[in-house]
Image (cartoon, grey):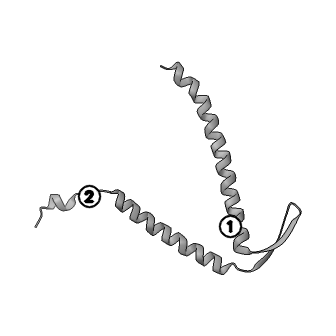
Amino acid sequence: MGSSAEDSRPVPVTRTSVAWAGVWAAALASIAFIVFILQNTTLTQVSFLGLHGTLPLAVAMLIAMVSGILLTLVLGTARITQLRRLARPRRHHNR
């Protein structure tokens, strides 16, 4: 058998173990997503900018979520770009 020093060493984190954890997280998120869709199939009246129609509640909520994510990405990208432009002249002066 191995010595106690060998037994106390932590197991190293590898790319494969990170990928395996990612696969499990994606699988659990997919299951939750499927349950969400199945539980929210009721048709809902939607009106937006003069357009009217009916959608399953899950679809309407997912459209709202994706729209919020896209808006956040656009605003975040604009802010990061702005900060990079402000930082660029300072880098050249410090050389």
Q: What secondary structure is marked by label 2?
A: loop
Residue occupied by mark 2: 10
The disc, 1 or 2, on the residue closer to the chain's N-terminal end is 2
Percent across and percent down for residue 8 are 21, 60
Q: Is residue 22 above or below residue 80?
A: below
Q: Which residue is mark 1?
A: 62
Q: Amino acid at mark 2?
A: Pro
Q: Residue at x 29, y 56 (%)?
A: 12
**For residue 87, which quarter of the picture?**
top right
Q: Which mark is residue 74?
A: none
How many numbered marks are there?
Answer: 2
Residue depicted at x 86% and y 69%: 52
Q: Amino acid at mark 1?
A: Leu
User: Residues under labels 1 and 2: Cα distance?
Assistant: 41 Å
Q: Name which residue lies at 63% across and 44% down.
A: 77
Crowd tier of the residue under label 1, counting other residues whose Cα lies within 10 Å: few below 14, some 14–19, many 20 or above: few
Residue 30, image x, y percentages: 54, 72
Q: Position of residue 53 (x, y in %)?
A: 83, 72
Under circle 1, the secondary element is helix
In the image, is residue 6 above or below residue 87?
below
Residue sitting nearer the eye, 77 or 8: 77
Q: Name the image quarter holding residue 37.
A: bottom right
User: Is residue 14 toward the left or the right of residue 45 in the image?
Assistant: left
Mark 1 vs mark 2: give the one in front: 1
55 is higher (above) or lower (below) than 75: below
Q: Label 2: how many residues lie within 10 Å, few (<14), some (14-19) or many (20+)? A: few
Q: Is residue 35 left or right of residue 1?
A: right
Residue 55, position as x, y percentages in the image: 77, 74
Q: Quadrant of residue 39?
A: bottom right
Q: Quadrant of the N terminus?
A: bottom left
